[in-house]
Image (cartoon, rainbow, N blue to C red):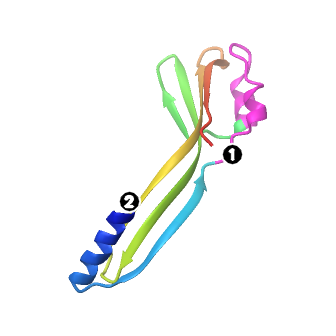
Amino acid sequence: MRKAFMVLALGGILSGCSPVGISSHSYVTGNPIPEENIKKIQNGKTTVDEVFSMFGTPEQTVDMGDVNLFIYKQCKVKGRSIDVRVVDVGSSSGESRCNTLTVTIDKQTKVVKTYNWQKVF
């Protein structure tokens, strides 16, 4: 990764552009997913209103016929970027790791059918 940034910087210098800077950044996207609330979810019992109360509005809702899939994500993003003194030219790279909660809600009964929790940080 470091070599790629050096190659880009050298390429910019040789082409008459000079790097403005190389920066590292990290940030978190999405809302926190309270783990203590995940333990409260019960298949066939927890209602859609209880899910909204515990986790808020999902980041994404997918209509899957008889069920709705709610997707909650919180991601940590780490990256590096090079800015070059040319209009709108630059390069960035990075990685994101996401904690993800998916909840399947039965449309008729309005209760949780299944859920899945994946914690990565």
**Left or right of 4 in this view: 43:** right
Write down the region rendered in magenta: 31-54
Q: Give the vertical position of 64 relative to 99 (above or below).
A: above
Q: Give the vertical position of 60 relative to 9 (above or below).
A: above
**Left or right of 44 in this view: 23:** left
Q: Position of residue 116 (x, y in %)?
A: 60, 25
Q: Which mark is residue 69?
A: none
Q: Quadrant of residue 7?
A: bottom left
Q: Residue at x 30, y 82 (%)?
A: 86
Q: Residue at x 56, y 43 (%)?
A: 98
> Is residue 102 found inside the magenta-colored segment of the image?
no
Badge 2 amino acid: Met
**Which of the marked residues, 1 or 2, is nearer the chain's N terminus?**
2
Secondary structure under tag 1 reads loop
Q: Position of residue 14 (x, y in %)?
A: 22, 82
Sort mark 2 into few (<14), some (14-19) or many (20+) by Cα contacts within 10 Å: few
Q: Give the vertical position of 6 relative to 120 (above or below).
A: below
Q: Position of residue 38 (x, y in %)?
A: 72, 29
Judging by the rendered image, the residue that carries numbered circle 1 is 32
Q: Residue at x 43, y 79 (%)?
A: 21
Quadrant where the N terminus lies? bottom left
Q: Quadrant of residue 89?
A: bottom left
Judging by the rendered image, the residue that carries numbered circle 2 is 1
Q: Position of residue 35 (x, y in %)?
A: 74, 35
> Is residue 32 found inside the magenta-colored segment of the image?
yes
